[in-house]
Image: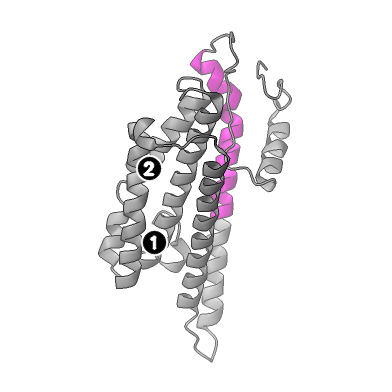
Amino acid sequence: PDSFSDGGKFLKNYSAKHHIKKMINDGVDIIDIGGESTKPGSQDVYSKNEWKRIATTLKKLKKRDKEINEFQQEVRRKVLTHYSVQSEKVDIANGLILINMVVDIERIGDYCKNILDLAINHPTQIISEEISEDLTAIENEVQLRFDKTLEAINKQDANIAKDMKKGYHEQLTGKSDEIVNSVLSGQLDFGPPSKTAAVALYARYLKRIGAHLKNITTTLVNPFDSIGYKH
């Protein structure tokens, strides 16, 4: 109700749900479901009240995400079952795996383009070593994962792929989310608002690149229906 961005337009669960759906269709990268205003001079909200404001929406969003994932996995199983009973044997599994990899590679390209656009449009150079130890760690981890992913795929090495599944949350997701959430809550800034926003976007883009690299390595260790998912 005290939001400075939407003025409490989406307080009801049904209106929040439709707004989230519209944002996803519009191609947003970040959805901020906040229960406390960050505008200057705003009153603090008790944690119980903040959770009460956002709990239902968050739970429904997570449930919908799970439903979509389960649907996609079931479709994969049915595709494989369909082709496995055909009289003409086709190596469909490897073909579908390749298609899945291409999707992740394309998305990595999209996020790299986002970073390039950020560098072109930001007035000054963003040097992570001068900004944040966590941002530098994220950069280094993504570079390492690029190299290791290429090595794992070229060598078809499942052991490298298994190692790549370790530490993803600690080294990428956790650090990126901490930067973004701290910026959104007003607990962290990097000087001018434009620079702060650029750093938050950069951290999120790096996280997404890392996620798609992880998806690619799962092609070596997960069954087809679980590629890109926890297994």
Alpha carbons under labels 2 and 1: distance apart: 17 Å
- Look at 60% across and 45% down and name the residue there: 64
Give the percent coordinates (x, y) of residue 195.
51, 30
Q: Nearer the viewer, mark 2 or mark 1?
A: 2
Q: Is residue 227 above or below residue 176?
A: below
Q: Is residue 102 left or right of residue 6?
A: left
Give the percent coordinates (x, y) of residue 150.
35, 64
Q: Quadrant of residue 128?
A: top left
Q: Please tell me whether mark 2 sits on a helix, a strand or a loop.
A: helix
Give the percent coordinates (x, y) of residue 216.
42, 62
Bounds of the magenta span? 46-69
Label of residue 227 in the image: none
Given the image, on which type of amino acid does mark 1 rest?
A: Thr
Q: Is residue 48 left or right of residue 23?
A: left
| Residue 204 sits inside the magenta stretch | no
Question: Which residue is the site of mark 2?
Answer: 172
- Look at 34% across and 54% down and name the residue there: 145
Count neighbours of disc 1 (C-alpha within 10 A) and say few if under 14, some if 14 to 19, many if 20 or more.
many
Given the image, on which type of amino acid does mark 2 rest?
A: Leu
The C terminus sits in image quarter? bottom left
Count neighbours of disc 2 (C-alpha within 10 A) and say few if under 14, some if 14 to 19, many if 20 or more.
many
| Residue 56 sits inside the magenta stretch | yes
Question: Which residue is the site of mark 1?
Answer: 218
Give the percent coordinates (x, y) of residue 47.
49, 17
- Look at 54% across and 13% down and name the residue there: 45
- Look at 63% across and 42% down and name the residue there: 28
Give the mark, 2 or 1, whose residue is nearer the N terminus.
Answer: 2
Q: Please tell me whether mark 1 sits on a helix, a strand or a loop.
A: helix
Q: Is residue 122 visible in this depiction of the protein?
A: yes
> Considering depth in this image, is 199 or 45 the residue closer to the camera?
199
